[in-house]
Amino acid sequence: MAAAQKKTGGKGTRSKSSASGTRGTRSSAKADETAKKMRLREEILAIICVAVALFLFFALFISAAGKLGVFFSLVFKGLFGNIAYVIPFVLILYGILLFARRTMFRGLRSGILVIAVFLMLTIICSGFYLESGSEPLAGASFGDVFNQSADGDSGGIFGMYIGWVLVTLIGKPGLFIFSFVVLIISLLLLINTPLS
């Protein structure tokens, strides 16, 4: 009788372990499938980033992207000043990092970090046009700042207005310190690699 129970117990153990093995294989297959889909999404995004960057490069640097390129060139220069010329390189770098698996696309978080990097560069650029204690934007309309920026004589609407607030609150050195710290932290989070 004890031998019969042992046989039954042995069969029960075998069937349980084979069932858990099957479940483990299924969950492993699902995880592999999910990872493949995520990787495919990242590669597609990397290709799109590089393609958009190339278009913007031709639009900003050599005005060879047609009327749409002229429009984007004017808008980006007006909004971001001379840092608009950095946009293609940031997008190419991000695309390469995605493709080389040095960073992962994490939806909204990745988008916010790329925007933070770009805005910090814009604010740093505006710091060269702003003076501590002065009010260069008093009386200047958005259109004036936009036109000056499109001509390369200003840090862009975003940079100038955010930079002006920072210079007013923490001074010009504070603007540079704040911007560089946020820039480095954003890059570390984006690349997901510590400095050490």
Image: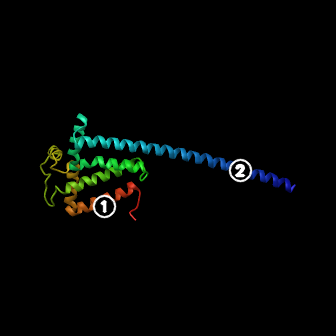
**Which corner quadrant of the image does residue 186 belong to?**
bottom left
Residue ranking furthest to the bottom: 196
Residue ranking furthest to the top: 67
Query: Quarter of the image containing the C terminus?
Result: bottom left
Q: Is residue 46 left or right of residue 159?
A: right
Task: Judge whether 101 appears above or below 177 on screen.
Answer: above
Say which of 50 and 4 sits in front.
50
Q: Is residue 7 left or right of residue 140?
A: right
Q: Residues within 10 Å of mark 1 (few under 14, many from 20)?
A: few
As shown in the figure, which amino acid type bears the numbered disc 1?
Val
As shown in the figure, which amino acid type bears the numbered disc 2?
Lys
Of the two numbered discs 1 and 2 on the same chain, state the one appearing first in sequence.
Answer: 2
Q: Secondary structure at mark 2?
A: helix
Say which of 180 and 157 sits in front.
180
Q: Where residue 159 sits: x, y (%)?
A: 22, 52
The residue at which mark 1 appears reads as 181
Task: Judge whether 4 appears above or below 44 on screen.
Answer: below
**Which corner quadrant of the image does residue 127 belong to?**
bottom left
The residue at which mark 2 appears reads as 16
Q: Is residue 72 left or right of residue 139?
A: right
Say which of 96 and 151 sits in front.
96
Say which of 35 and 174 sits in front.
35
Is residue 105 something that shows in the picture?
no
Q: Where residue 160 sits: x, y (%)?
A: 20, 52
> How far is disc 1 from disc 2 in space, using C-alphas?
55 Å
Q: Residue at x 23, y 56 (%)?
A: 124
Q: Residue at x 29, y 51 (%)?
A: 118
